[in-house]
Amino acid sequence: MNNRLKVLRAERDWSQGDLAEQLQVSRQSVNAIETGKYDPSLPLAFRIAELFGLAIEDIFTSPSKA
Amino acid sequence: MAAYRSSALRRYVIRLAVLMSIYLVTLFIAVKAFRADAVSGPLAYALAVLPALPVIGVFWAVMRVLVEEPDEFMRLIHVRQCLVATGFCLTIMTIWEFLQNFDLVPPGNGGFGAAFFWFIGLGVGAVYNRLTIGTTGCM
């Protein structure tokens, strides 16, 4: 699933490790989500959205709209 | 990318070390006893099965990682690794069985049974994960 995670992270000058630490997941998870190799569960997607203060659809592109 | 080590993986490594130590001790005892022809009857059966118990324990330890791993992506990686291992093991054992059925290979397995190939399969699964999704999961 396409997403803006890398851009949002870069805007805050966070490394993948920084984001992983705040989300309490592995750095591999952040990398896999950013590169579209893994789609997060709904609870993790909500955690990501809440961390950036955005709605889920502002971060992740719906596959039907991609 | 640095290796990932969750508390679940750390527990797995400890369990693996303990179970493999028990395996080596029980295997040594069983081999010694059978070579010396020191056991027979029900005790022989019990002693023959004894080294299998820590191997079964390793299966349990692997499954515990799937339950205890807190990171959902790493859980997926471990599940994929186990599925590849299972497919690899079943493939090898099925081919071997048919080769034996047609007397193309000798009977028996020389000590390399299903567990051995499943553990080899875990390694194959780690390589598969590395190639397809970018990380091995380190299990």
Image (cartoon, coloured by chain):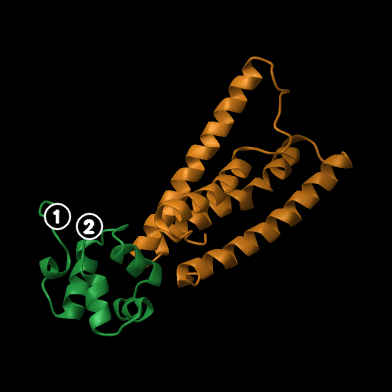
Chain colours: A green, B orange
For the C terminus of chain A, the quadrant is bottom left
Could you tell me residue A43's position as x and y percent? 21, 66
Q: Amino acid at mark 2?
A: Met
The residue sitting at 59% across, 38% down in the picture is B114
Q: How many neighbours does mark 2 have within 10 angstroms: few (below 14), some (14-19), or many (20 or more)?
A: some
Q: Secondary structure at mark 2?
A: loop
User: Which mark, residue A1?
Assistant: 2
How many numbered marks does the figure carry? 2
Q: CA distance from mark 1 to mark 2?
A: 8 Å
Q: Chain of mark 1?
A: A
Could you tell me residue B13's position as x and y percent? 57, 65
Do tag 1 and tag 2 residues touch (Cβ < 8 Å)?
Answer: yes
Could you tell me residue A21's position as x and y percent? 35, 80
Image-based side of A12 in relation to B22, left or right = left
Image-based side of B83 in relation to B41, left or right = left
Q: Residue furthest top?
A: B102
The residue sitting at 56% across, 51% down in the picture is B123
Asked if residue B127 is positioned above or below residue B93 in the image, the reply reads below
Observer-nearest residue: B136 or B53?
B136
Q: Secondary structure at mark 1?
A: loop
User: Which mark, residue B74?
Assistant: none
Image-based side of B76 in relation to A45, left or right = right
Q: Amino acid at mark 1?
A: Ala
The residue sitting at 75% across, 49% down in the picture is B27
For the N terminus of chain A, the quadrant is bottom left
Observer-nearest residue: B86 or B16?
B86
Asked if residue B108 is positioned above or below residue B83 in the image, the reply reads above
Observer-nearest residue: B61 or B81?
B81
- Which residue has dot 1 on it? A66
Image-based side of B36 in relation to B7, left or right = right
Q: Chain of mark 2?
A: A
